[in-house]
Every structure is written in structure tokens, then in C-alpha cells.
Amino acid sequence: MERLDKFLCDSGVGTRSQVKLILKAGRVTLNGASVKDPSMKVDPDTQEIALDGERLGGRQRIVVMLHKPAGYVTATEDARDKTVMELLPKKYGDVKPVGRLDKETEGLLLFTNDGDLLHRLISPKKRVPKVYYARHEGEGTPEDTEAFEKGLTLRDGTQCLPAILEPLGPGESRITVYEGKYHQVRRMMASRGMTVTYLRRESEGPLSLGNLPKGAVRELTDQEIGILTELTGAFAGK
């Protein structure tokens, strides 16, 4: 058994807010009878759930982790560059990147076919931590760490949320951010005089690269997906 609104989202009907409107309009039926309660428990294996008279089959939610190598752009297609989609097995053709890593940045990149989960993972309101390892010019100081904690204003006026800078010695740092602005980590470091020469995302939320080889892919377990959905307030389960 699962919630009706989750089943509808997994079936590709729409986002959670769109599903609420569709249910309110009486467009969904359960065994021929109109249903409007999004929290209703349904069993797709034994009950017929339809939208505007067309039966829905549901689908399994997929979340995939890639250890992205440098040289690939985070896009579903690009006329000039190799894309991260080329690194995924063809069976994952309907997934989309969760946020983006720039072409030369390596590390953890998630993909999913669940639009609701995707948007929640990248929303700054959810404060999902993303941890990066950087090699750079110079060395971080206590003043740099304090500036990150207060929230940096970049040279073009972009305001960043408070972040964490952990200097690891000359030319090395670990950075934790809670949003995903354009080239954010590189720009934040540059604003403090530390030009980044190498950047790798090591973790996102509760997930880390572990020993996943560069260029390799693995599906998240049901338990890992459950933790992500609980963290972001999205639907739990498949």
C-alpha cells in the first residue's frame, strides 16, 4: 500500500502541488469512483487507478550516483561537449541531473526520475549540505573562515548563504555549501584570493562517494532514498 499522491507523482502525473490540484478537480478515479484524498492508501496491484479515464501503471523511482570525471558538462545534451548522460547506462535514460557540477569539477553527482525529489534536493530552503575538497592558491585563514560563516558577497553582488571553510593546510581546503549557485565554490574561494585549481564534490546530504571509482555509477538503495526523502520532506519509499 502507498499514498495516492505519491503513486500519482511516481506515475509522472506531475509534481506534488500539481497532483493536489488534479485530485481536487476530480480527475482521478479508483476502481471507477472519483477520489480526492491525496493521503488515501492504494494498492496499484489490485486496484485500478486512472486519470481522465486512462489507467496509470506507476513506476519505480530511481536515484543514481555518478563519480563524475573532469571533461563532462552537466547537461542532458550539448552540441559541443561530452555530457554526463554519456556515462550512464542506457537503462537510466529518463533520469535528470540533480543540480550541476561544472565541466572541470569532479565528484558526486546524483540523477533521478523523481522531479519532486530533485527540486527539493537543490532548494536552498532545504539546506542540503554539499561538501567539496579543493586545491587552490594560497592558504585559508581564520578571517576567511569567518567570512564564509557570515555569508560572502561575491564581486558581482551575488549574496551567498553562510558556508563552512575548513583549511587543511597550504593550498588545500574543505568547503561546505547549502546551495548551488553558478560556479559557487570557485567564485567564493576566488573572492578570498584563493584561486581553485582542482575541485571535487565528496558528499551531498548523507551520501558520500565512498570507494566509487571515477566514471562509475551505482543505484542508491531503498534505505538511502528513504533517508534523502526524509531529509527533504519529499515522499518516502519507492
Image: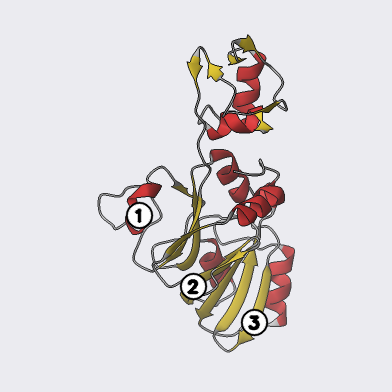
| Disc 2 residue crowd, few under 14, some 14–19, many 20+, Cα 10 Å | many
Please say if 87 is above or below 46. below
- Circle 1 or circle 3, nearest the eye: 1
Q: Specify the label residue 199 is tagged with.
A: 2
Disc 2 versus disc 1: distance between alpha carbons?
A: 25 Å
12 to the left or right of 32: left
- Would you identify the image quadrant in which residue 193 lies? bottom right
**Which of marks 1 and 2 precedes in the sequence?**
1
Rendering coords of residue 45 (x, y %): 56, 29
Q: Nearer the viewer, mark 2 or mark 1?
A: 1
Q: Nearer the viewer, residue 125 or 158?
A: 125
Quarter holding the C terminus is top right
Please tell me whether residue 3 is drawn above or below residue 163 in the rendered image: above
Q: Dot 3 corresponds to which residue?
A: 167
Mark 1 and mark 3 lie on one chain; the one further toward the N terminus is 1
> At numbered mark 1, what does the secondary structure look like: helix, strand or loop?
loop
The residue depicted at 50 percent of the width and 36 percent of the height is 59
Quadrant of image for the N terminus:
top right
